[in-house]
Amino acid sequence: MMYTVKELSDLAKVTIKTLHYYHKIGLLLPCEVNEAGYRLYGMKELERLQQILFYRELDFPLKKIKLILDNEPDRLSILFEQRQLIVARKKRLEQLIQTLDQSIAHARKGEEMDQQEMFKGFESISEWENAISEQREYLQDRYKFDVLEEKPIDVKVMNESAIEAKLFMENMVWALTEGLRYDDKKVQQLILQHLEFLNHHGHKIDSASFAKQTRFFLEDDFHRNMLEQQQKGLSYFLCIAAEAFDKENK
């Protein structure tokens, strides 16, 4: 059976734009292009795409994935290796979830968390480099911007920021699903507390910069999808809430 780009996109739950990009960089080529100009994919291409997506789940850069797959290794060997890597990732993510849950519980109670417990899961700079590799690669490709060149990783700061970001987004999702208006006092207070945290931890971001950042998240496909995966409408709600906060605090 042959699949068009649209059919493959629906089947694999990836965007048509992604498939076109994979074709452009030689990562996933169609088996043929018909007279009408449609790219067509067969079972061999489906298997390769599956392997690509497993590696993407493991945060492998596209260049590294292409290098691995172009060496034509045995498919079964790849699958076994990917399973081992994903099981190891699962264990680490379970530890990270536990650390986040403990951190959120302490933050809500206003209690200090044991310093050794705070950093379980992210044990080195390389862990954070892997965690942000997809976003970093996207920003480099789309905007010629290297987030690590702009601001090198500080593991302690990144861990604390990740906890705060998760708590803030959870609260914004709560506000959205509860039907609060974007300019509700509770929503505006959440933004105020978030900015206070960021500035206290050296990020130096004012209300205008934050509003600009959320507008970028709304308009950029990659970041909008990240937010929408958490809650439908979150990217728009966050943007207009931030702009309302900025307007109120000018």
Image (tube, helix red, strand yellow):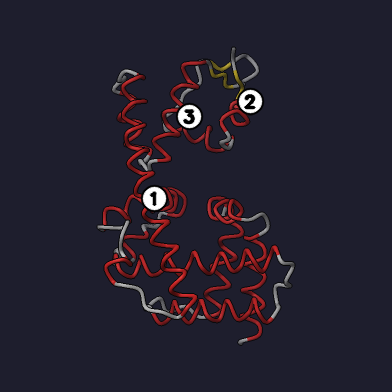
Q: Say which quarter of the image contains residue 217.
A: bottom right
Sequence-earlier tag: 1 or 2: 2
- Which SS class for mark 3? helix
Q: Which mark is residue 23?
A: 3
Q: How dense is the environment of label 2, judged by Cα within 10 Å: few (below 14), some, or many (20 and up)?
A: some
Question: In the picture shown, does residue 63 fall above or below 70?
Answer: below
Q: Seen in the image, is 212 located left or right of residue 143? A: right
- Give the distance between the C-alpha atoms of the residues marked 3 and 1, in whole angstroms: 32 Å
Q: Residue at x 42, y 66 (%)?
A: 102
Disc 2: which residue:
7
Q: Seen in the image, is 195 located left or right of residue 68? A: right
**Residue 54 in picture, x, y percent from top left:** 42, 34
- Give the distance between the C-alpha atoms of the residues marked 1 and 2, in whole angstroms: 32 Å
> Closer to the observer: label 2 or label 3?
2
Q: Residue at x 28, y 22 (%)?
A: 71
Disc 1: which residue:
93
Q: How dense is the environment of label 1, judged by Cα within 10 Å: few (below 14), some, or many (20 and up)?
A: some
In the rendered view of the protein, which quadrant contains the C terminus? bottom right
Closer to the camera in the image, 46 or 211: 46
